[in-house]
Image (cartoon, coloured by chain):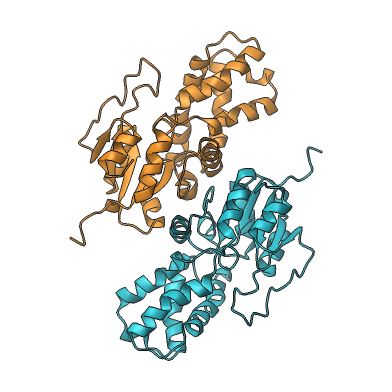
Chain colours: A orange, B cyan
Amino acid sequence: MINSPETKALLFDVFGTVVDWRNGVARELRPFLSRHALAVDAFELADAWRRQYSPAMEEIRSGRRPFVRLDVLHRENLDKALAECGINPGSISADELDELNFCWHRLDPWPDSVEGLLRLKRRFMIAPLSNGNIRLMLDMAKRAALPWDAILGAELVRAYKPSPQVYTATVEILGLNPADVCMVAAHNADLAAARRCGLTTAFIVRPTEHGPAQTSDLHAEQAWDFAATDLNDLATQLGCPT
Amino acid sequence: MINSPETKALLFDVFGTVVDWRNGVARELRPFLSRHALAVDAFELADAWRRQYSPAMEEIRSGRRPFVRLDVLHRENLDKALAECGINPGSISADELDELNFCWHRLDPWPDSVEGLLRLKRRFMIAPLSNGNIRLMLDMAKRAALPWDAILGAELVRAYKPSPQVYTATVEILGLNPADVCMVAAHNADLAAARRCGLTTAFIVRPTEHGPAQTSDLHAEQAWDFAATDLNDLATQLGCPT
């Protein structure tokens, strides 16, 4: 039995899996849009901002651009999203946009997240394995009381998920075998990449991450090791007392 | 006033400043020595082990050796310390020495550390800036309830204090100005290096880190920005309520 995998650490995707980025970003865009009398729907701008996320990281994943942290990409993406919504970013002070950019540091957790993480933390090491940078994750955790044991992720490895080195280098930092580490995510593609690196996998369904009309990631697309309705359900499945 | 420094983050040396490594290591060496009927004093072996610490890092600081994490150096140093105390490390199973090596993950905090950190955490970002690797710091924090906001330090930067890039790269990760970050340590040399990088400094006196006959670091050797008797005293000086 000593070679059988035994989960020791859980690594969490954060945007969408632990926190509700869409409502959090829209909450901060609303007063911004109102202050500038801009007739743009806050969710429309939030979605436009998020659509720039993956293409911006792809520049780095592909090697066309050296690594920069997500705060930098988010700030560039904000200009693009504003333009896409018909707003000239040059018409707004850079200081104000810099401050608005930090709304990603102030996202609220899903209702089950803090309780689920506290239960899981008693039995496992828990850490984010997010594309968000360390300061972003730190600010978010401090505000939302996310009880991480450490902040791991893209910035440590200087690469973005789903590049395999993000998973393998993080497992190496933890001094564990890949099979002893479980990736927890609401996104099938993240889990598929983790599984290719030998990690175990847990799917959390977050059916409104992209709003009420969400069509992606509504179901587990592979037989993941665990599939749960939320982080409390995952804690129960992993035998963590309430 | 907007350009005046305002402390936002506190970075902590850990071995000696936050935890009592000498008693913790000796506590685990005692049953080991007894089990092998070795007539060596546990403190003597702990001190011999620790004496290898700085020379081992110096190989990496000097560029003569690529970065390896502290767990690796500690394991090599254990063999040297055993030999220095007249024990042939080859006479003991590698598995047992590997396990003994993790005693550095199980050190107890000084009596004031947890309360002091909890008070400081309400007002500041708090993180270790230790030469200990991430997994070491994670295990220690989980066992001892050290409430870090993130685990920063040597392994992220792949360099050992007091090399300046450890301080400057950590400040950069936090997205802060050096003057907004305070290094907290029981070691004048650590604070001197941090000050050369522009950080503010807080000296904590730990007069028995090296045992009752300690002669070093008994006093602040420069006019550090703060000097405190323990972490609770520092919290009080920084205006953190009890």
B172 is higher (above) or lower (below) than A145: below
Q: Please provide percent x and percent y for residue B137.
A: 48, 59
Quick check: A225 left or right of A106?
A: left
- Outermost residue on the front side: it is B242
Residue in front for this viewpoint, B240 or B88: B240
- Left or right: residue A224 versus residue B17 is left
Residue A199: where, in percent of width, then height? Answer: 29, 47
**Count of residue discs:** 0
Quadrant location of residue B39? bottom left
**Residue A81 shows in this picture:** yes
- Of residues B136 and A51, the one drawn nearer to the viewer in this rendering: B136
**Considering the image in quadrants, where does the N terminus of chain A appear?**
bottom left
Which residue: 75% across, 68% down?
B220
Q: Is residue B168 above or below residue A91?
A: below
State the residue at coordinates (59%, 77%).
Answer: B210
Furthest residue to the right?
B1
What residue is shown at x 70% (from left), y 74% (from top)?
B218
Whether residue B64 appears in this view of the structure is no
Return the residue found at the far left.
A1
Q: Quadrant of the C terminus of chain A?
A: top left
Q: Residue at x 25, y 40 (%)?
A: A237
Residue B71's image quarter?
A: bottom left
Front residue (pair A135, A143):
A143
Q: Position of residue B34 (x, y in %)?
A: 36, 84
Residue A96 image position (x, y, % from top left): 67, 25
